[in-house]
Image (cartoon, helix red, strand yellow):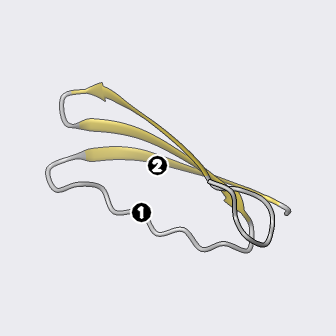
Amino acid sequence: MPLPQGGHIAVSWEFVSAGKLKLRIEAPEDIEVNVTLPEGIEGEVTQVTYMS
């Protein structure tokens, strides 16, 4: 998703097994990202930041 001030946020996800999600988020370092997984889902969240 492009951002008005430049840069972007990219999200990719994959169900690795029943009830387990692998989530990757790429966002500029000055953007605060809050992640809430759906109820009943466990997950591994990776956040990558970059200079915009």
Is the residue 13 above or below the residue 49 in the image?
Answer: above
**For the residue labelled by badge 2, is the local secondary structure a helix, a strand or a loop?**
strand
Q: Which residue: 70% across, 65% down?
A: 3
Residue of label 2: 45
Mark 2 residue type: Val
Query: Residue 52 vs residue 15: left or right?
Result: right
Q: Which residue is mark 1?
A: 35
Mark toward the start of the polypeptide (2 vs 1): 1
Left or right: 43 as drawn, with respect to 38: right
Q: For marks 2 and 1, give the CA distance.
A: 8 Å
Between marks 2 and 1 in the image, the one whose residue lies nearer the viewer: 1
Q: Nearer the viewer, residue 48 or 52?
A: 52
Q: Are marks 2 and 1 in contact (CB under 8 Å)?
A: yes
Circle 1 sits in a helix, a strand or a loop, which is it? loop
Residue at 27% from the left image edge and 36% from the top image edge: 20
Q: Quadrant of the C terminus?
A: bottom right
Of residues 48 and 13, the one nearer the viewer is 13
Residue 32 position within the rendered picture, expressed as x and y whole percent measured from the top left: 60, 74
Mark 2 neighbour class, 10 Å CA radius: few under 14, some 14 to 19, many 20 or more: some
**Residue type highlighted by circle 1:** Val
Residue 16, numbered label:
none
